[in-house]
Image (cartoon, rainbow, N blue to C red):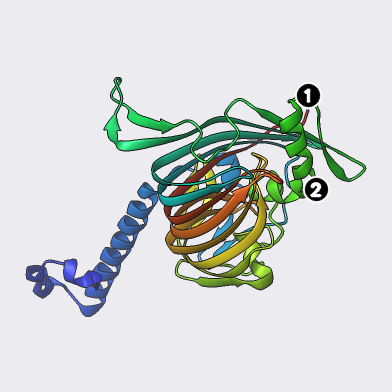
Amino acid sequence: MNPRILLPSVLLPLLASCDKAREIANDASAKVREKVVSAAAATEEPTDPELAKLVDRNEEGAVFRKDLPFPTRIEVNLTTTSDLQMRVFESSAIERRSSNVTGVMTGREKIERNGDHVRHSRSEMRLTDPTAKDADGKPKVLSDNPLGMPGPGLQRVFHRSNGKWEADAGSGFAVTAQSKDLAPVLDVLLQEHGLAPRPQWFSKRRLKIGDEVTLTGDSLPVLIGGGAKGTLKLKLESFDAVSGHPCGVFSVTGDYSRRQYPSFDGVFTDEDVTIQSGKVWLSMIHPLIIQWEMDTIRTSKTGSKGGQLTHGQGTAKVTLVREWKALPSE
């Protein structure tokens, strides 16, 4: 819109000269731009002042930094919410069964890293029916263990010695055995959960609103690690903050697949995923993913090594939020 149309038409004949008209029009234009910028800023969550000092952004765009020292003491609180419409098939050495999993699955976990020591604990994993209420008026719980995952309260502890991660004993035989399976792939888990920088990140080129990036091959680990294959398309939509952490907000679509992708719960997953639509919040100061929102179609095969396998097919609308904190070194 041309800002000059904001001037009342009855005033135009009273202007002393064309130069004066231009001056007033330019002034109006500046005020309009100021209002637009102010309105845009008002929609953004406030950025932590100390983190804001680390952002490299100007009128030409922003650099998604990877040059800053990565913290050695970190705490991540992760909340994952998945609206599921899945057909699930379970198989073991003694039986096979199938069921429909429909509802909202919520998981909460905490991961802490202090140098060469890592601790993971899960506080919640449950499936609820948002269309039904319990006696307290809350969404009805359908299962506290919807996909055969280890229950809340278990802790997994790892330490690194001579460059290799090892599982600490003391959590019971089954958990300790599963944790030993995870130790060789713990670096992947740390990268995926924000406890280590992602192995691939953006170049030093500045990105501005509207810029598009295609991730495939060696660049796919910017978003999807664990030996994934596929193609994802990103478009920088805005700049915002998550719990004060400065981020670039990208829309994302595409497909990817990966095999034997680990989780802290001791299971490994083969999955093929189509992201129909989504958004991802990428840190502007470290190679980190802070938040995901995605509408997906997926097939998966999940299980612990030597244990029961769970096959799933269907759709999942997933929201993943990381509360990421760098803590002072001890």
Asked if residue 261 is positioned above or below residue 75 in the image, the reply reads below
Query: In the depicted view, which residue is nearer to us: 58 or 22?
Result: 58
Asked if residue 323 is positioned above or below residue 253 in the image, the reply reads above
Which residue, as the protein is rendered here, is positioned at the far top? 136
Q: Is residue 69 visible?
A: no
Circle count: 2
Question: Label 2 belongs to which residue?
Answer: 184
- Residue 170: numbered disc: 1
Image location (x, y in percent) of residue 283 = 58, 52
Query: In the depicted view, which residue is nearer to us: 101 or 84?
Result: 101
Image location (x, y in percent) of residue 25 = 25, 70
Q: Residues within 10 Å of mark 1 (few under 14, many from 20)?
A: few
Q: Amino acid at mark 1?
A: Gly
Which residue, as the protein is rendered here, is positioned at the far left? 10
- Whether residue 184 sits left or right of residue 218 in the image: it is right
Q: Residues within 10 Å of mark 2 (few under 14, many from 20)?
A: few
Quadrant in the picture for the N terminus: bottom left
Q: Which residue is depicted at the point 28% across and 24% down?
A: 137
Q: Which residue is depicted at the point 58% across and 34% down?
A: 109
Image location (x, y in percent) of residue 279 = 45, 57
Query: In the depicted view, which residue is nearer to us: 303 or 69?
Result: 303
Cβ atoms at labels 1 and 2 below 8 Å apart: no
Q: Secondary structure at mark 1?
A: loop
- Whether residue 261 sits left or right of residue 97 in the image: it is right
Asked if residue 10 is positioned above or below residue 190 in the image, the reply reads below
Query: In the depicted view, which residue is nearer to us: 263 or 87?
Result: 87
Q: Amino acid at mark 2?
A: Pro
Q: CA distance from mark 1 to mark 2?
A: 19 Å
Asked if residue 99 is positioned above or below residue 117 in the image, the reply reads below
Image location (x, y in percent) of residue 231 = 56, 71
